[in-house]
Structures are given as C-alpha cells and as structure tokens.
Amino acid sequence: MACVQTGPAPGEGAPETGQKQELEVFDPASYTREMMLEDYDFFWTTLEENCVAFGLIEQATRIDLEQIKQEYQQMISNLRDGDAKQFV
C-alpha cells in the first residue's frame, strides 16, 4: 500500500515509450493506523501460508508466535494515524 505505481511496469502490457515512469513518494503522514494493521496482517498471513517451517519454529523454540503477533498488533493499534516511523 505504501508504494503506488502510476503506470504498468515495463513488460506488463504497456509498450516501452522511452519515458521514465514516476512513482509517488511515500508520505508517512498519509499512512493510517488502519493501513498499518492491514499491512501487518498481510505480513503474518504471508508467513503462515508460505513458510513451511513456521509451525516448527514454535515447537523448536517454545515461542508462542500468536502471542507475539497479538502483542505487536496491539502496539500498532496504539499508534496514531501518520505515525509511520513507529510502525513495526
């Protein structure tokens, strides 16, 4: 969500025009708490769905990953909109 492309990347159906495509600069003030929580949830979902050894990490280390997930989610919930520098 933080990176917004203004046009298709080369090779994604758009003919090369020789012009550079510009990306919007990320403005931390526009990063809302809701966006942070969505990104955090996406991070965990990606790990859970794609990391084969994810469950084994808990067993081998005896770390409760769900507890860690909830603790950091709570920290993000306590942030203000635009407080992207504190986003973990």
Image (cartoon, grey):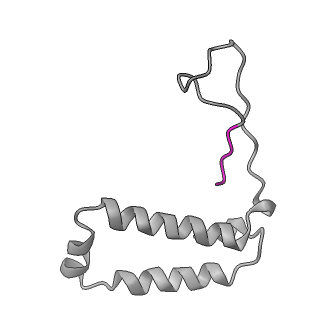
Q: Residue at x 20, y 81 (%)?
A: 59
71 inside magenta stretch = no
Q: In this rendering, would 55 be left or right of 11? A: left
- Residue 31, by quadrant, is bottom right
- Can you say whether 87 is above or below 18 in the image? below
Q: Position of residue 30 (x, y in %)?
A: 79, 61
The structure residue drawn at horizontal position 23% and vertical position 62%, both measured from the top left corner, is: 52
Residue 62 occupies quadrant: bottom left
Rendered residue at 53%/22% (across/down)? 11
Q: Is residue 19 above or below residue 48?
A: above
Residue 18 is situated, as x and y percent measured from the top left of the image, at 68, 12
Residue interval drawn in magenta: 1-5
Q: Quadrant of the C terminus?
A: bottom right
Count of numbered badges drawn on the protein: 0
Task: Where is residue 74? Give x, y as percent.
Answer: 58, 85
Q: Residue at x 68, y 45 (%)?
A: 4
Q: Residue furthest front?
A: 13
Left or right, 83 with respect to 55, comes to right
> Is residue 50 found left or right of 6 in the rendered image?
left
Q: Position of residue 77 (x, y in %)?
A: 65, 82
Q: Quadrant of the N terminus?
A: bottom right
**Magenta stretch mostly in which secondary structure?**
loop
Give the vertical position of 8 relative to 80 (above or below): above
Task: Name which quarter of the figure residue 64 lies in.
Answer: bottom left
